[in-house]
Image (tube, helix red, strand yellow):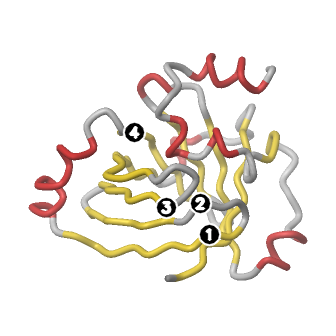
Amino acid sequence: MAKEIERKFLVNQLPFDLATHPCIPIEQGYLALEPGGHEVRLRRKGNLYFLTVKSQGGLVREEFEVEVTSTQFETLWPGTKGRRLEKDRYLFEEFELDVYKGNLQGLLVAEIEFENEEKAQTFPLPQWLGAEITHINFLKNRNLLQYKSWEAIQKELGM
């Protein structure tokens, strides 16, 4: 499996207009969630489809991803019922911004991927980033499914 090295941050206020940046709609659902362990995720990213296995973790996680056909995706998608979320992903040069939809509307998360742990630790963070959530387990996508609203997550965070 490949390693994913990523830091995540809440975003309280955007210093730019999202309409000027490319956006990809994402639907993802979970086929399997091992408690405290691996997850098997199905994702539609624009017109592309992926099956992903990820390990539990913080800054560094194991990740294996394969592209699947739309037919394979549609065949497996019903198995994710009750374990789905939607978001729009905005693409920037150094990071991606996820704007959650549905019951998680209001949640904004910036993700920054790195080629190694040293670069992850020394990266100069933009001023507009909020609290780092890389190591907050209940804010991982797989765990967001349990929340009925962004307000409930804010309450959990004491915001």
- Residue 31 x/y as whole percent: 31, 52
- Residue 112 x/y as whole percent: 68, 62
Marks 2/4: CA–CA distance: 21 Å
Give neighbour class at mark 2: few <14, some 14-19, many 20+ (Cα, 10 Å). Answer: some
Secondary structure under the numbered disc 1 in the rendered image: strand
Disc number lying in front (1 or 3): 3
Secondary structure under the numbered disc 4 in the rendered image: strand
Marks 2/1: CA–CA distance: 7 Å
Residue under the point 56% across and 42% down: 18
Three-letter amino acid code at the position of disc 1: Arg
For disc 4, the marked residue is 86
Classify residue 17 by image quadrant.
Answer: top right
Which tag, 4 or 3, sits closer to the chain's start? 3
Secondary structure under the numbered disc 3 in the rendered image: loop
Three-letter amino acid code at the position of disc 2: Gln
Give neighbour class at mark 3: few <14, some 14-19, many 20+ (Cα, 10 Å). Answer: some
For disc 3, the marked residue is 38
Residue under the point 53% across and 82% down: 2
Query: Which of 111/140 is in front?
Result: 140
